[in-house]
Each structure stands twice: as C-alpha cells, then as structure tokens.
Amino acid sequence: MQNDKVKLSTLSKMKRDDRPITMVTAYDTPTARIVDAAGIDTVLTGDSAANVVLGYPDTIPVTVDELLHHTRAVRRGLSRAMLIGDMPFMSYNISIERAIENAGRFMKEAGADAVKLEGGGCMADTVRAIVRAGIPIVGHLGLTPQTAGMLGGYKVQGQDAKTARQIYQDALGLQAAGAFMLVLECVPARLGTLISKKLDIPVIGIGAGNGTDGQVLVYHDLVGIQSGFTPKFVKRYAQAGEIMQKAVESYCKEVRERSFPGEEHSFKISDEELAALGKTINA
Ligand code: KIV
C-alpha cells in the first residue's frame, strides 16, 4: 500500500482517515529521489525555486519555462509521490485562456500531476476553468508570496476576525470552484485548524499550526542548506549545509596536499605499455 502511487483519491482518503499528508518542495532529480525514497506523499516544485536555487530576490521574476525545466527534473526522480507544479506570477493572472494554457504546459511538458496557484475569491473563475479543462488544482491562501507587497510584506495573515473571515470564505470559494487541495501559509494555528475542519478538501499548512490536514516545508529549510533568515515556522531537521561545506573544505585540502585522488580513485596502465609509450614520445 505504502508503495502505491499517490493519487487525488489517496489524499482525500487520508483526510477522511485523519492521516496527515506530507509535502516538501524539490527542484531537481537527486532531491526528488531522496524525498520519494523517504516516503513523502506530495512534492511541490514551488516558485520558491526562484529565491532558493536560482538566486532571485523573491518569486516574482521566475518564468514558466524556468519552472517547467525544474518540474521535469523532479518528475524524473519520483516514482510514488504526487508532483505538483507551481504557476509563477503572471502566468495565470492575465486571462483565463493563458492560465489554462500555462497550467496545461505543466502537465504536458513537465509531467506534473497537478498545479498550484495563489489567490482567493478573484481566482475562483480561473480555478473553475482550469479544472474544467481537466487539470487538478491546488489553491494557496494566507500569505501568498507573489502578492506579499499587497499584503504589507511577509507577515502573518488573518489575525483579526475580518481578515480571518476573508481567508475562510476564500477557502470555501476555492473548494467550490473545484480545487482538490489547499495550501494555507502563515496564519494563526487556530484559524488553520478551523479551516481544515470546515473544508472537505485537504488543507496543507506552512506556518498554519498543527491542526491542518498536512504540512509542507521548503526542502532546503528542512535539511538546513539554506542560510540567512529562518522563518518561525521552519524546523531544521539537519544541518546539511554544514556537512556539505565541510566536505568541500576536505576536498580542497586533499587536492592541495596531493592526497586526492588516491590509488583507489585512479586507473592503471601496465609497465610494458608505459615503456612503449615512452619509446614513441622520446624517439
Ligand atoms: O513555492 C513554494 O515553495 C510554496 C510553498 C512554500 C508552499 O509555495
């Protein structure tokens, strides 16, 4: 059972059975292999690739083509987990036709099983049209990084009754429009729990407390590769960045003192062949 491919029905059943759903980001094949082997349920090739692995300051500049490239790489490393492609800023906001076309590219050209987009009530028609085109869709509410500027920055959302109600209504609206799952980012834990209980579809939290139907973290935060600011909702399960840096330091040291490569990493030529070579190049 554990090895069966994760489908939409698997996730709905997990919600019904109150079994938490795991999600993590991945942007390349080796990471996809690691998280798949670890038994993750869903993998998001997030637009966070922009700042996490592409060196952009935020998620705004990343393009559909760049994210397709990363989603394809992740596809090649997964065998069990569901793959969700993330629609970047302006790939679904200009017109419904463009949104369907771009969402379709994630499935046709990158092998995604579903796509995710950010936004509340104003996205309902777009979500409905994408679902009607046969593309499973995940909503994203709360702190939506693509529009963080409009929300007053990277801040907790829904801390007063009025904004909390808006998030709740948006969640209901996305569910009614056909989204099969929802990511809820950076909202009070009690709001995360309330929305998860009220919705029939699974709600995956990031900074939304322990009462959601599942959790998502950015892989580089989880394994400790990311340096710099660590949001409150991140738990680092390893310090892989330190281990990686130490490995490269050891490599540099051994190359400089000529102890790498050793004999075990080198190829052989017989004495006779080397002598024959010597004769030809010394002649
Ligand atoms: O792009 C991303 O990584 C995300 C997750 C943080 C949910 O949207």
Image (cartoon, rainbow, N blue to C red):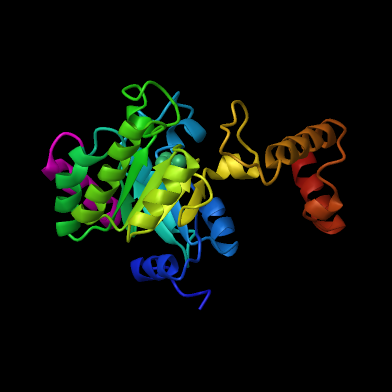
Q: Position of residue 188 (x, y in %)?
A: 47, 38
Ligand 1 visible in quadrant: top left
Foreground of the two, 242 or 216: 216
Residue 273 lies, with reference to residue 65, above or below; the image says below
Residue sitting at the far bottom: 1
Q: Examine the rendering and report whether any part of residue 83 can be seen.
A: yes
Residue 180 in the magenta stretch? The answer is: no
**Quadrant of residue 7 within the rendered picture:** bottom left
Q: How many marks?
A: 0
Q: Residue at x 42, y 32 (%)?
A: 159
Side of 46 relative to 219 (left or right): left
Q: Residue at x 56, y 64 (%)?
A: 39
Q: Examine the rendering and report whether any part of residue 24 can be seen.
A: no
Q: Position of residue 65 (x, y in %)?
A: 31, 40
Residue 11 lies, with reference to residue 96, above or below; the image says below
Foreground of the two, 225 or 267: 225
Q: Residue at x 53, y 74 (%)?
A: 2
Q: Main secondary structure of the magenta part?
A: helix
Quadrant (top left, top right, bottom left, bottom right) of the C terminus: top right
Magenta extent: 93-109
Side of 280 relative to 263 (left or right): left
Residue sitting at the far front: 161
Q: Position of residue 51 (x, y in %)?
A: 47, 30
Residue 152 lies, with reference to residue 224, above or below; the image says above
Q: Position of residue 149 (x, y in %)?
A: 35, 21
Side of 65 relative to 22 (left or right): left
Q: Residue at x 34, y 41 (%)?
A: 141
Residue 95 in the magenta stretch? The answer is: yes
Side of 260 relative to 200 (left or right): right
